[in-house]
Image (cartoon, coloured by chain):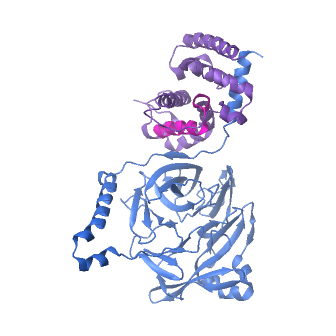
Chain colours: A purple, B blue
């Protein structure tokens, strides 16, 4: 028999879970999609699905990890759609690290964020989950559904790649 | 500085660009019945028939059919929302109705176990494509004997009067499973007030200590902080002044059942004034004798008071509308021209003088001194909002 996590089994508790984590999840999504409005949409969609579908999780402690994974999936879908601009002409704001948004972030930080976004998807996600969300290897592995050893190797290569990107822009 | 330090700082600053603020959780519209999903098609077909039919009619009938009278609704919104509680097997629902004709534009039923209690408009929520309302919802009844949990939802209605989306406000509380419950919010929706009855004696909550079981109370929530206080009687109407600093409370006093309009300073609920006495001096106060008040409200612009007076008339009550402002009062229409058999509800357009009254099952539109019954014999709603 499936045992729902408490926050999912008791729908009255879902708004509290949302209140507690929505800002953190929107911030996580902003790192990947670049603008707050899109990030909010991604997080909202995830919670609407949580409310409607009640995913079959057996471990209550994995609810947040599950939600993070769903947010990352949502972000990937957004980025995929943006690449197919000729088919999905969705308008979105320039990322906060773009030249248009120069007033929002200092130059050095914008440079780092731009370099981060030139990295392949998995490297980018590993770095965000470690250096923004402060997740240990094991939790990153759960969110990205990869092995912890893969997290470690990807992390190492991602840092090296980021350093090269930053040096290349000097 | 290492690349790791630079990355950590950049990510932290990027994250800080996102403010930690409430983001109401929207829901997708609930699944509609097949005929409802096809309604736009039927509507388009009906509209086409209305346009094309006159050309198919003999000349002598064409003009009279085409020139349907368009009711004057002044500057009022084209629709209003009426909330109906669940009764027996019939679930609670809200209805969107046309201001001009009272015609039903859309309806949506509550989920299993939910009940809709009250509705309040958010006219300045900044959405150009929709009008937003807040709904006070009883969510379940299983918390303790005589208690229920309540929440506030946000609904959006399109310019055409169609329900488009749900959201959840960060308001949840436990109270007695009995009403009535009233709801108010500011034009921007940043403050929320509701009335309720305590269901646990001396129960300590994050907002303070609840009074005895059944005590009528009012809560005011602003910036994640909720303040509650005893209302001193059954609350029949709640409305914020436009700046949200004051809350107008229309209540039936517990001792003698008289109706009374009070204005409470939300920052200090003990700071209470009685505007009916203040507005026009003693003479006006005598004329607006609270004993005859059926309903009263501070208008959304905060400058006027609208009162409904009821006098026995046959088996029902004859109503009179009076507006008080700047030290004087004037009747809005001939006295006694309206009838009511039950509680009276009032709503006013946020930026105009048009009024909507609900007297039992009748909905009445008041525009330019003229009262028009737009829903003559409907179900009695628990609340209405423009």
Residue at the image point whose x is 58% and y is 22% from the top: A125
Up the image or down, B1 lies above or below B260; here it is above
- Left or right for A121, reference A168: left
The number of callouts visible is 0
* Magenta span main SS: helix
Camera-nearest residue between A33 and B174: A33
Q: Image point 60% across, 79% down: which residue?
A: B307
Residue nearest the viewer, comparing B118 with B124: B124
Residue in the picture at 60% in, 16% down:
A137
Image location of residue B366, percent across then percent down? 51, 78
Q: Is residue B339 magenta?
A: no
- The quarter of the picture where the N terminus of chain B appears is top right
Let me know if residue A40 is in the magenta part. yes
Give the left or right position of residue B61, taking residue B219 as reference.
left
Question: Magenta residues?
Answer: A30-50
Image quarter of residue B326:
bottom right
Where does residue B31 sit, x and y in percent of width and height? 37, 48
Q: Is residue A104 above or below residue B328?
A: above
User: In x, y percent, where is residue A99?
Assistant: 67, 31
Residue A147 place in picture, x, y as percent = 52, 13
């Amino acid at each position: 028999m499936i045992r729902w996590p408490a926050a999912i089994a008791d729908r009255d508790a879902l708004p509290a879970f949302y209140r507690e984590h929505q800002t953190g999840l929107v911030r996580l999504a902003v790192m990947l999609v670049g603008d707050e409005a899109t990030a909010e949409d991604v997080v909202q969609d995830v919670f609407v699905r949580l409310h409607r579908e009640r995913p079959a999780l057996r471990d209550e402690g994995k609810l947040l990890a599950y939600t993070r994974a769903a947010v990352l999936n949502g972000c990937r879908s957004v980025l995929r759609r943006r690449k197919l601009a000729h088919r999905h002409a969705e308008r979105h704001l320039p990322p906060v690290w773009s030249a248009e948004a120069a007033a929002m972030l200092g130059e050095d930080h914008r440079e780092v964020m731009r370099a981060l976004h030139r990295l392949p998807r998995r490297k980018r996600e590993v770095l965000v989950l470690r250096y923004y969300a402060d997740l240990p290897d094991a939790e990153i592995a759960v969110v990205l559904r990869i092995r912890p050893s893969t997290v470690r190797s990807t992390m190492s290569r991602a840092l090296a790649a980021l350093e090269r990107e930053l040096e290349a822009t000097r | 500085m290492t690349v790791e330090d630079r990355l950590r700082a950049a990510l932290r600053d990027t994250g800080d660009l996102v403010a930690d603020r409430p983001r109401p959780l929207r829901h997708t519209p609930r699944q509609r019945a097949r005929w409802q999903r096809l309604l736009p098609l039927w509507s388009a077909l009906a509209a086409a028939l209305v346009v094309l039919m006159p050309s198919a009619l003999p000349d002598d009938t064409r003009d009279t059919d085409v020139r349907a009278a368009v009711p004057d609704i002044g500057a009022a919104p084209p629709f209003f929302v009426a909330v109906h509680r669940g009764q027996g097997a019939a679930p609670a629902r809200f209805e969107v109705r046309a201001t001009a004709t009272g015609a039903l534009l859309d309806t949506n039923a509550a989920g299993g176990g939910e009940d809709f209690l009250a509705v309040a408009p958010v006219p300045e929520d900044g959405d150009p494509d929709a009008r937003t309302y807040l709904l006070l919802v009883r969510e379940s009844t299983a918390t303790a004997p005589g208690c229920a949990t309540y929440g506030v939802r946000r609904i959006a209605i399109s310019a055409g009067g169609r329900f488009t989306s749900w959201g959840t406000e960060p308001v949840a509380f436990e109270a007695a499973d009995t009403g009535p419950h009233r709801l108010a919010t500011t034009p921007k929706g940043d403050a929320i007030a509701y009335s309720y009855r305590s269901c646990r004696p001396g129960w300590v909550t994050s907002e303070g200590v609840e009074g005895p079981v059944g005590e009528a109370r009012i809560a005011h929530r602003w910036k994640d902080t909720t303040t509650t206080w005893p209302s001193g009687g059954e609350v029949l109407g709640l409305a914020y002044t436009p700046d949200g600093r004051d809350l107008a409370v229309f209540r039936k006093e517990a001792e003698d059942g008289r109706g009374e309009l009070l204005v409470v300073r939300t920052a200090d609920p003990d700071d209470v004034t009685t505007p009916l006495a203040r507005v026009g001096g003693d003479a006006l106060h005598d004329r607006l004798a609270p004993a005859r008040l059926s309903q009263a409200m501070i208008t959304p612009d905060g400058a006027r008071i609208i009162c409904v007076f009821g006098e026995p008339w046959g088996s029902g009550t004859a109503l009179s509308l009076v507006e008080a402002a700047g030290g004087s009062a004037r009747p809005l229409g001939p006295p006694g021209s309206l009838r009511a058999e039950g509680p009276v509800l009032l709503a006013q357009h946020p930026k105009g003088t048009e009024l909507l009254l609900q007297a039992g099952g009748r909905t009445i539109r008041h525009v330019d001194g003229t009262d028009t019954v737009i829903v003559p014999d409907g179900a009695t709603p628990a609340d209405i909002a423009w």
